[in-house]
Amino acid sequence: MEIATTTLPPSVNGGTGPHSYAQNSYYQRGALEAAQEIIKREIAEKLDINQLFSGSSTSFCIADFGCATGPNTFLAVQAILEAVKLKCQSSEGLNSDHVPEFHVFFNDLASNDFNTLFLSLPPKRQYLAAAVPGSFHGILFPKASLHFAFSSCSLNWLSKVPIEVTDKTSPAWNSGMIHYTNKEVFEAYSSQFAQDMESFLHARAQELVGGGLVALIVPGHRDAIPLSQTTIKMEFELLASCLMDMAKTVENDCCL
Amino acid sequence: MEIATTTLPPSVNGGTGPHSYAQNSYYQRGALEAAQEIIKREIAEKLDINQLFSGSSTSFCIADFGCATGPNTFLAVQAILEAVKLKCQSSEGLNSDHVPEFHVFFNDLASNDFNTLFLSLPPKRQYLAAAVPGSFHGILFPKASLHFAFSSCSLNWLSKVPIEVTDKTSPAWNSGMIHYTNKEVFEAYSSQFAQDMESFLHARAQELVGGGLVALIVPGHRDAIPLSQTTIKMEFELLASCLMDMAKTVENDCCL
């Protein structure tokens, strides 16, 4: 469950200033908006309300793994909540007025700016809110306690840089590069991603109740589609633009 | 459930600097240490483990209402957890190895410094941790979901200044005073305390499972004991000392 501090990925920029995640997450919001209809449809089709409430529980627990500081997480939670409400109201065997209490858990690393998240919680929300600090590659909830696990644009952040990439004697050594230059590096990162996905899913499998759902939004692209036709091209261009700006700043400083 | 922002009491000083609550809460720690043995004894005597686990739940939920930023809350939680573990291991009808998963919720106002709390969580803790932002005078948890509600040195902070005290036309008007000078002021604060306790207990009554326990540490003193024989005397002396220091600072500044 524990990951050494030195290998933890950095958290997103906190606060609400011009460089904060809260002010610079339109791209992630776009991914969420694109997926919202699919999530709503899947909840309508696949969520078995009667099975979920066959025990003594009367509350419905939603968790957003890798929530950052907002505001995207609040939009996602609201969409999930509305879809579950609709499903409850249209389910046979349940009183049409029956809407469960919603308990929403916002998860991110302990270094995430939860202070900003808490202060920007929607004041008229329809749910009880809580936060869970820690890596989503480990257990964060009691067994069979979650009804809906969600994660958007978070699983692409690996738990650590693969050891081989930082090993000078390895063919996957990638010093001085900002992207991969050979298949060994590619394979090292792929392998790390596979390990991370496995640990994430293994933890969620224990935390979810029978009949619970998982919805994941993970940036990626299909095989055989050229990079130039994917959003990754845009990300590389953005990164290149930042590096050019940094280079110009250094150049100007040198000329002073 | 909602309390207007303007009437909310201030949160404790965040961070871990010299003026932080984390560095200035030895007095509150003393109160906790004095109460620990009573809490342990009451858990041993009164907690009905078999009743608590008669449903499908296998986890034991503890909440600290008004936790501040630590480290006192971690000591309290550990003491409660150890006492519950002991009770489980000695209970008939349960496997002696049976120890539930502990789910601990740290509650305080949304303006509390939860970032400091999360970063100082004990690394080798025996529980899953979560935080709940919001006033403990309202509902914060789903119905019948908590097993142990705890609060230490928090309920003495009122939800607001009583309206009468700020009303110039009221006999309880107390402008310019740092303590009460007549019985109307005393009664206004007493009445506010009674209302706050009622709303606190009303919320917990809904959140607790049948057979759950509540432990509260509230500073106070017995009737007929002179103030000079209570800790309140110490607090007044501390406050007076601070005011004297402030007055000296102003005096020195004027002489410059």
Image (spheres, coloured by chain):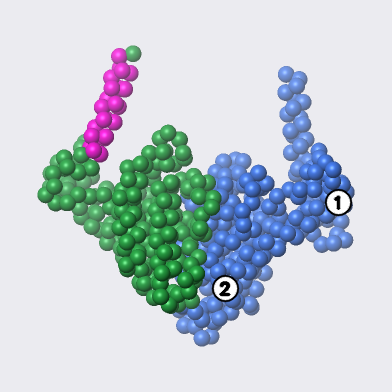
Chain colours: A green, B blue
A249 over A198 or under it: above or below:
above
- Badge 1 is on which residue? B184
Q: Earlier in the sequence, mark 1 or mark 2?
A: 1
Q: Amino acid at mark 2?
A: Val
Range covered by the magenta-colored residues: A234-255
Left/right placement of residue B186 relative to residue A58 reads right
Are callouts 1 and 2 both on one chain? Answer: yes
Checking the image for residue B145, the label placed there is: none
Checking the image for residue B209, the label placed there is: 2
Give the residue furthest to the top: A256
Instruction: Name the spot of residue B138 as percent of width and height, x first.
Output: 62, 59
At horizontal 59% and vertical 76% (from top left) the residue drawn is B210
Left/right placement of residue A19 relative to residue B239 reads left
How many residues crowd mark 2 within 10 Å: few (<14), some (14–19), many (20+)?
Answer: some
Name which quarter of the figure residue B66 lies in.
bottom right
SS of the residue at dot 2? strand
Q: Closer to the camera, A40 or B135?
A: A40
Q: Amino acid at mark 1?
A: Glu
Name which quarter of the figure residue B124 lies in.
bottom left
At horizontal 74% and vertical 27% (from top left) the residue drawn is B250
Instruction: Name the spot of residue B189 as percent of width and height, x first.
Output: 78, 53
Q: Closer to the camera, A148 or B109?
A: A148
B17 over A145 or under it: above or below:
above
Q: Is residue A11 visible?
A: yes
| Quadrant location of the N terminus of chain A in the rendered image | bottom left
Q: Closer to the camera, B14 or B26?
A: B14
